[in-house]
Image (cartoon, coloured by chain):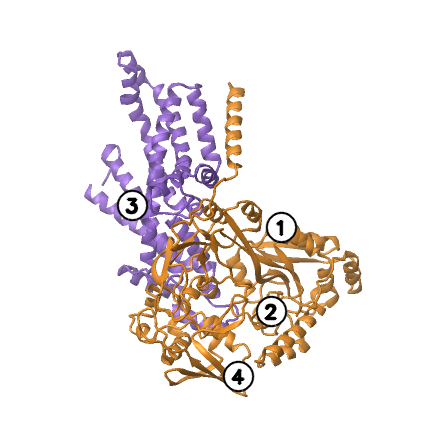
Chain colours: A orange, B purple
Amino acid sequence: MIPSRFRLALLGAAILSSLSLTAPAQAIGGKPAVDKDTLVVALSAEPGNLDPQVAPSVDSAKFAWNVFDTLYGFDRTGKLEPRLALSHEVSADGLTHSFRLRDGVTFHNGDPFTSADVKYSLERILDPVTKSTRRPYFINLVTSIDAPDAHSVVVHLSQPDGAFLNKVAGYLYIVPKAYTQALPSPEAFAQAPIGTGPYKFVRHEVGRSLELTRFDGFWGERPAIRNIVFRFIAEPSSRVHAVLAGEVDLVTEVAASDVDTLKTNHGLEVLSIPGGSPLHVRIYSKDPTSPLHNRDVRLALNYAIDKDAIIKSVFRGLASPLTSIIPSSYPYGANPTLKPYPYDPQKARQLLAQAGYPKGFETSVYFPAVFARGAGEAVVAYWGQIGVKAQLKVIDYVAFNRINNVHQSGPLAFSEFGNAIYDPIHVIGGSVSRTGTWSDYDNPEIQALIDRIESVSDLEQRDAGFREILRRTQEDGQAIPLAELALNYAQDSALQWQPQIGGWSLSFRQAAWK
Amino acid sequence: MLIYLLKRLAQSAITVLFVVAIIFVVIRLIGDPTHLLLPPEATEADRVVLRHQMGLDRPVLVQFGAYLAQLARGDFGISYRFSLPAGQVALHALPPTLMLASAALVLALGIGIPLGVAAAIWPGSVVDQFGQIFAVLGQAAPPFFFSLLFVKLFSLHWAWLPTGGYGTPAHLVLPALALGWFAAAGVARLTRSSMTDVLGAEFVKFARIKGLAEQEVILRHALRNALLPVVTYVTLQFGLLIGGAVSVEVVFAWPGIGQLLYDSINNLDYTVVQAAVTLTAAIFVLINLLVDVAYALIDPRIQHG
């Protein structure tokens, strides 16, 4: 009785497990999920707020690049290119930025685009009632905006800002003045957003889908695909299943562990591009009583880790070496002459002894649960090899953000951040500068370099300035750079589309079916 | 009876109010949404401005008072994440959840009861053994596991059904199966044990001695009595299915209230969390109320006064 029941259970389990391992065998290539007029995209997170001035940039970039325009925008590699502006001039003192606007542009509702819309858009961001998430970028910077004629805008700044144009490109989406002002509440715009972009809003069903359709009055090149449908699939394996079953044409944020499986499917194309986000361990080094205040200790923690092994085993090769917190995929500012600290436990031990910690020390490191756990475990194990006993404190991402943004995530914390404006100042200002949100680092010499670069607009000088800053931070062991992770996408092989380099923004202006 | 009903309604309203109060405070303890909404470069001064605009700089008690006044007008506030009315966002997610929970429940009853009855009638038989395995699998493996298994099988291997999403009856099948199996397992076990008890009871023996056909003994006498605890169990299950379908909803990208709550908590979208919890609590309490009323009507032993 019991043995037979046991056998039956075993048989059942065997059947179930064999089925669960069955590889899907389906041809997808050339068979769009809907038709060749439509592109169905699976996103990991819903771009909740459709007001591009209110939504946080991670969210809005998924759809806003298609519906809205900015005065300047970024090309696929992050270089600035004119969009609603034709040209831009900055005064010698760096305080006055003048834009010449494009003529003949209309909003989705038929309103003509003029300088009044630009002035209104920026003022709307500054108005606290809008609850704009972009307000912090402009509030202490912009003093006034003039619209001398219908096609010129002049922005006056309180201090020179070398990255101002990048901020305009990344954060200043243009909304129509007359339409927006006539709405009953600031929140109403999100329910019926109007822009000048190549696609216009059709429908948003919370939790289900967001639909866009081509705007025939678009000023620029007409996109090839008529309809864009976003679907929201939070679970990574479910996203992969959806593209394997041909229910969606493109999936974002494919896990490194799924890439190999997907690559074997001829109907699919896997795109892995540099994510632009530096995975590193943040160091709280200001406190003079902490071992981490000592440069030798910081360097020892760098030498102790075999980063290539982590890239190979944890990230399956879908990551590149990182020498500083500005990855090499940046359009400028990265320092290609730097080499990562080699894996040298002997040297690490020697440095620790030199610093007065021959037997190592005990510490702890925060680790957001969304990161690949293996990376955290590997780093802690490598440090264990040189006597540094670090406790891995795995923490929920929301909770982590809360402590990480207010200097409570010490003494060590795994960190990563994207950059919506492509200029390194976002990252350098945030994690190297004395006053940075994620910075517990204070180096007077490097600080002087950062203060100087804030007002430099010339790209070549900016590039050189950042390179110098990165060289010095590496020398000083400001952080422990681990890797630049790739962002992986999978798409129907009949789809022609290339993702943004070093960013999570999605633009379908160039997408087409073969 | 009317007084009893009014009393129970008042009790239910108080219960919901308590739930609202607790969630209102607890969600505020989890985190400050301005940290998530504003970019990391934002200064404390920036956060103060936004907090003020959102009304989050007032004492919690004042906020709660204002919220109750809002609720009285049927206004749940505006979602931080969507800039849409929070009540509308939560209501929009309700039909998919109710649909999924109902389908799962129908499956649970349709599979669980016959399986349980058969197992009780023929203990130790192949049917009984199958029922045991079915129940053990259903209860031991989380619905999450079956969800993934079903997708691999029915969507990828055989390509019969979609891997996820919402809209057509085909989209409902797999999530309902995954969730329904879990519920069916409990129903089957409970039916079996309850039926076994009843089959050994005096009145069933008496019915047999009377010479009634076996079919009639089982269906008319035994099953009706055996089902009472099952009905109680199932009504409670329905409440659980509404709130507890999160893992299934996530795997199938099912736009229900579980998924909405999960996302809203992660995004610290206070107003939507409050609206969704209030709504589910109200449904839960209402179901319990209906069950109690039904019992009161059926069972003369329950006093109402």
Q: CA distance from mark 3 to mark 2?
A: 52 Å
Which sits earlier in the primary sequence, circle 2 or circle 4?
4
Q: Name the residue tied to disc 1.
A: A316
Query: Label for residue A431?
Result: 2
Q: CA distance from mark 3 to mark 1?
A: 52 Å
Q: Residues within 10 Å of mark 1 (few under 14, many from 20)?
A: some
User: In the picture provided, is A351 more to the left or to the right than B221?
Assistant: right
The kind of residue on which mark 1 rests is Arg
Is mark 2 in CB contact (under 8 Å) with mark 1?
A: no
**Which residue occupies the foreground of this view, A263 or A179?**
A263
Q: Are marks 3 and 1 on the same chain?
A: no
Residue drawn at x 71%, y 64% as measured from the top left: A339
The kind of residue on which mark 2 rests is Ser
Which sits earlier in the primary sequence, circle 2 or circle 1?
1
Which sits earlier in the primary sequence, circle 4 or circle 1?
4
Q: Name the residue tied to disc 4.
A: A159
Q: Residues within 10 Å of mark 3 (few under 14, many from 20)?
A: some
Residue B45 appears in the picture as rendered: no
The x and y percentages for residue A60 are 44, 64
Q: Are marks 4 and 1 on the same chain?
A: yes
Q: Chain of mark 2?
A: A
The x and y percentages for residue A422 are 55, 69
The kind of residue on which mark 3 rests is Leu
User: In the picture provided, is A117 more to the left or to the right than A514?
Assistant: left
Secondary structure beneath label 3: helix
Q: Residues within 10 Å of mark 4 (few under 14, many from 20)?
A: some
Tell which tag, 4 or 1, sits nearer the viewer.
Answer: 1
Query: Label for residue B286?
Result: 3
